[in-house]
Amino acid sequence: MKSVVIHAGGSVTVEEQPMPQLQNEQEVLVEVLCSGLCGSDLPRIFHAGAHFYPITLGHEFSGQVRACGSAVDDLEPGERVCCVPLQPCFTCDECQRQLWSQCRHYQFIGSRSDGGNRQYVVLPRRNLFRLPPEVSPVAGAFFEPLTVGLHAMQLAGGCANKQVVIIGAGTIGLLALQAAKALGARSVTAIDINPERLALARMLGADQVFNSQEMTAQAIHAALTPQRFDQLILETAGSPQTVTLAIEIAGPQAQVGLIGTLHRDITLSSACFGLILRRELRLLGSWMNYSGPWPGVEWQQAMQLFEAGSINLDALIAVQAGPQGYADAVRALNGQPMNGKIVLDFSAPEMEKS
């Protein structure tokens, strides 16, 4: 079978590997159909950030069941599934409270073990989420990133009747934008420095967009003032500047959901820190995308949003290609951020969309 393999030094190759086999009664053999490149994969590829090399990445993927272990009685060959990549221990104190992402001993498919960027993979049954027939394989590969934003909204008590502000109009941000609209937000605002991303955000339903390279934080705060109460700000870009921006534009008692992962230290000025106190801001750290019961209401919400046709994916995909085209597209990034999602599509190996 073909596998996209990452070697130390940023080497991305397509290799033939042995077909995996079922090892126990709780496992399922899955034929992978589509797999998305996550921004968190880039340090693993280009900046020596993987737990080991060579490694097959891929934690955002969908597939089709090919065979099941003898104890798996709720899946049938031919059914489509997507990967639930977290592997908590299910026994520590945190797991007993269904705080899966806080597990002390977790593993993670596509990071701490080989993932789904290969034609076939064997996974435990509990790491598969059944997809309804009307949800496409491409949509299945977007369940995991969609649930990232949904988890932050869940921690915030939902987004109904709130002014939702999304900072960072990348894949996570644009998925969160669409979800917030569908889940009853009073208004949704997108903030970015890229005019093309902001135009895309507007096309996907943003009520207003702001370019934070052209407007000061004070100007954005003033523009948001007419609806300044019941604010939920979601920071998805993961930079010191955007975290600071999230605090500076917030209204009274706003919820500030911090989703993006920082790779550089942040220093808050005393004036910025003072805003947290004076405006009585509610800072919400959001890590991964799980809640009780396993894997969480976020995954059920994602299914409902896709079933309802509330999520537009076409505009988010920059490249959709077979193994070699995917490897070429990843290699071409050379460590820079993606401008649109790169999707590995095993169902059409020569097809590419760009």
Image (tube, rainbow, N blue to C red):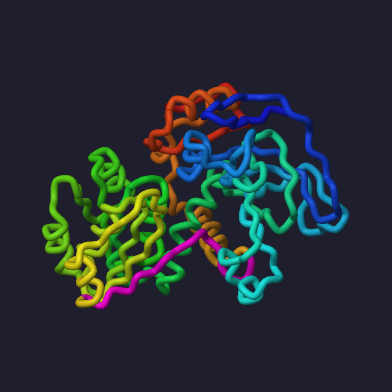
Q: Quadrant of residue 7?
A: top right
Left or right: residue 233 compared with residue 333: left
What predominant SS class does the magenta segment belong to?
loop
* Residue 20 percent across, percent down from the top left: 78, 38
Q: Quadrant of residue 179?
A: bottom left
- The residue drawn where x is 76% and y is 54% is 75
Q: Is residue 213 magenta?
A: no
* Residue 34 percent across, percent down from the top left: 59, 38
* Residue 37 percent across, percent down from the top left: 51, 39
Left or right: residue 195 compared with residue 290: left
Q: Residue furthest right?
A: 70
The C terminus is located in which quarter? top left
Q: Nearer the viewer, residue 334 or 37?
A: 334
- The residue drawn where x is 25% and y is 64% is 247
Give the answer, above or below, for where 298 lies relative to 54: below
- The residue drawn where x is 13% and y is 51% is 215
Q: Quadrant of residue 216?
A: bottom left
Q: Which span of residues is magenta-colored?
A: 279-294
Q: Nearer the viewer, residue 280 or 25?
A: 280
Give the answer, above or below, for where 324 lies relative to 134: above
The N terminus is located in which quarter? top right
